[in-house]
C-alpha cells in the first residue's frame, strides 16, 4: 500500500507516491504517464548494482522496456562532463520528445537526470525514483535540476518538474548510515523552517526512524513532501517564499564548495551544520532565543549526525573566504547575500539586509571552536 501527496501545479500536477515495494510494480505505477512502453534510466553504479534489476523486473511485469546508463556515484558526478555523457547517451538511444527519462538514485542522479531531460530536444518528460532519504524528502520534488560549477553549487540548471515521483521507502534499507543521516539533515530543516510540532515529533521519534521504524519513516517522508509541495505551489521558481527551503544552505553551499564537493562533507550534512549556523546567527542578532541552536545541535548529536564545523575533516578556509564563496549564491540580490533566519523553531523568514559582521563572527567562532576541538 502506498500513500500519495499531490503536487497541484496547474496543468502539470503530479503524484508523489510513498510506500514499500513501489519499485516492484514500477511499470504499472508509471503506465499512466508513459506514451510508449519504454523508459531511459539514468542511475549511479552503486544503485545500479543494488536495485536496477528489481526496477527492470518491475517494468517488465507491465511490458515496459528499460535502457540504462550508470554513472559514478557521488557529488562529483554533478558536473559538465557527466551531463554531456548522459545527454549524448540519451541522443545515441534516439530518445524522442514523447519518451520518458527516469532518474533512479539519490539527489545527484535526480538533479543531473532532470537537467539532462530539461535540455534534451528542448525538454523531455522525466520521472523521479528517489533511492536516498534525502531524495525522497526533498530533491525529487519541486523541479530544481542542475549541476555544480567549481565556482558554486547548482549554478547551472533549470526548473523542470517531474511527471511522477515513486518513493519506495523499502529501498532505504540498503542506504549506508552516513547517507541516511545526511538525508535526515533535510528532514530536520522542514521542522525548523515551518513546523515546530514536526520538529518536536522528530526529537521524540528520530532515533526510532533511524533504527528501522517503518511507519515513522513513512510519516517523515510524507510530512516533508507535503511541506515542500505546499511551498513549491506558492512559488515554483523562487521569486520569494521558496527560498525558505534554503534554510542552512547559504552556509552549506559555501562549505561544499570549500571542500571540493567531496565526501569530506555530504550535502545533507552541510544542511544540518548550516541550519545550526543560521540559528546561531539568528540568536546573535537577537531574533530568536539562544536555546534554539542549542536544541538543534542536541538533537543532531542524539541522532549521531554531524552538527558543527568541527565535524568536517581537513582544512577549511577562514570566515572571509567562506563569505566570499557565499557571494555566488543564487539568492544574492543587488550584490547582497540573502540569509534564511528564524524567530523560533518553525518560524523561518527571508532576510535580505543582514550585516556581515555578525555572520563573520559566527563563522570565526565556529572555526575557532573547531581548532580547539
Ligand atoms: N533538487 C533539489 O531540490 C535538491 C534538494 C536537496 C538536495 N539536492 C541535491 O541532492 C544531492 C545529494 O543527494 P543524496 O544525498 O541523495 O546524494 P547521492 O545521490 O550522492 O546519494 C548518496 C549515496 O548513496 C548511494 N545510494 C543511493 N541510493 C542508495 C540505496 N538505496 N542504497 C545504497 N546506496 C544508495 C549513492 O550511490 C551515493 O553514493 C546534492 O547534490 C544536493 O545538491 C537537490
Ligand atoms: O527545492 C528547493 O527550493 C530547495 O532549496 C531545496 C534544497 O534542499 C536543495 O538543496 C536545492 O537544490 C538548493 O537550491 P539552490 O537553488 O540553492 O541551489
Ligand atoms: Zn538541500
Image (spheres, rainbow, N blue to C red):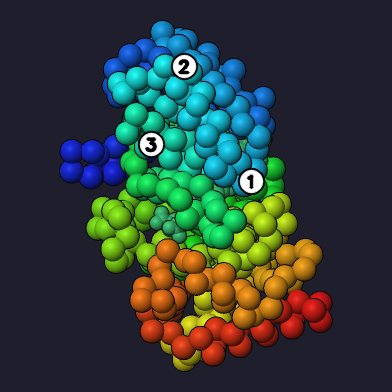
Residue drawn at x 61%, y 88% is 361
- 3D distance between C-alphas at marks 2 and 1: 25 Å
Horizontal and vertical percent for residue 181? 63, 53
Give left or right: position of 353 versus 269: left
Closer to the chain start, of discs 1 and 3, is 1
CB atoms at circles 2 and 3 under 8 Å apart?
Answer: no
Measure the alpha-carbon separation of dots 2 and 3: 16 Å
Q: Which mark is residue 119?
A: 3
The answer to whether one can see residue 191 in this image is no
Tell me the element at label 3.
helix
Q: Which mark is residue 76?
A: 1
Mark 2 residue element: loop
Give above or below for 149 relative to 69.
below
- State the image quarter where residue 124 is shown: top left
Q: For the point 77% across and 68% down, which residue is it?
A: 315
The residue drawn where x is 35% and y is 47% is 159
Disc 2 designates what residue? 93
* Residue 240, position as x, y percentages in the image: 29, 66
Quadrant where the image shows the C terminus = bottom right
User: Which structural element holds mark 1?
Assistant: helix
Pick the front one: 173 or 197: 173
Split into quadrants, the picture shows ligand 1 in the one at: top right
**Residue found at the far left of this picture:** 10
Amino acid at each position: 500500500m502506498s500513500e500519495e501527496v499531490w503536487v497541484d501545479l496547474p496543468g502539470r500536477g503530479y503524484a508523489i507516491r510513498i510506500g514499500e515495494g513501489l519499485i516492484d510494480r514500477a511499470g504499472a505505477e508509471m503506465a499512466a504517464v508513459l506514451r510508449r512502453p519504454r523508459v531511459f534510466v539514468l542511475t549511479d553504479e552503486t544503485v545500479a548494482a543494488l536495485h536496477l534489476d528489481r526496477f527492470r523486473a518491475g517494468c517488465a511485469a507491465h511490458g515496459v522496456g528499460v535502457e540504462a546508463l550508470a554513472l559514478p556515484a557521488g557529488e562529483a558526478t554533478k558536473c559538465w562532463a557527466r551531463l554531456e555523457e548522459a545527454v549524448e547517451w540519451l541522443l545515441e538511444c534516439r530518445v524522442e520528445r514523447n519518451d520518458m527519462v527516469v532518474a533512479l538514485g539519490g539527489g545527484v542522479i535526480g538533479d543531473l537526470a532532470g537537467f539532462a531531460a530539461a535540455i534534451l530536444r528542448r525538454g523531455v518528460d522525466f520521472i523521479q525514483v528517489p533511492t536516498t532519504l534525502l531524495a525522497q524528502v526533498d530533491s525529487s520534488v519541486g523541479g530544481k535540476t542542475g549541476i555544480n560549477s567549481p565556482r558554486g553549487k547548482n549554478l547551472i540548471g533549470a526548473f523542470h518538474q517531474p511527471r511522477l515521483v515513486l518513493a519506495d521507502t523499502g529501498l532505504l534499507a540498503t542506504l549506508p548510515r552516513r547517507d541516511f543521516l545526511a538525508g535526515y539533515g533535510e528532514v530536520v530543516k522542514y521542522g525548523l523552517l515551518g513546523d515546530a510540532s514536526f520538529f518536536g515529533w522528530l526529537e521524540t521519534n528520530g532515533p526510532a526512524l533511524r533504527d528501522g521504524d517503518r511507519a515513522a519513516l513513512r510519516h517523515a517522508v510524507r510530512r516533508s513532501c507535503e511541506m515542500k509541495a505546499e511551498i513549491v505551489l506558492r512559488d515554483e521558481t523562487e521569486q520569494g517564499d521558496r527560498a525558505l527551503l534554503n534554510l542552512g544552505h547559504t552556509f552549506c553551499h559555501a562549505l561544499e564548495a570549500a571542500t571540493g564537493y567531496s565526501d569530506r562533507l555530504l550535502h545533507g550534512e552541510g544542511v544540518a551544520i548550516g541550519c545550526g549556523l543560521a540559528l546561531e546567527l539568528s540568536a546573535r542578532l537577537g531574533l530568536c532565543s539562544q536555546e534554539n541552536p542549542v536544541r538543534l545541535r542536541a538533537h543532531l548529536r542524539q541522532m549521531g549526525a554531524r552538527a558543527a564545523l568541527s565535524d568536517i575533516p581537513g582544512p577549511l578556509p577562514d570566515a572571509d573566504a567562506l563569505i566570499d564563496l557565499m557571494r555566488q549564491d543564487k539568492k544574492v540580490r543587488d550584490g547582497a547575500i540573502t540569509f534564511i533566519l528564524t524567530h523560533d523553531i518553525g518560524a523561518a523568514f527571508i532576510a535580505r539586509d543582514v550585516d556581515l559582521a555578525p555572520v563573520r563572527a559566527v563563522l570565526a567562532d565556529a572555526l575557532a571552536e573547531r581548532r580547539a576541538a
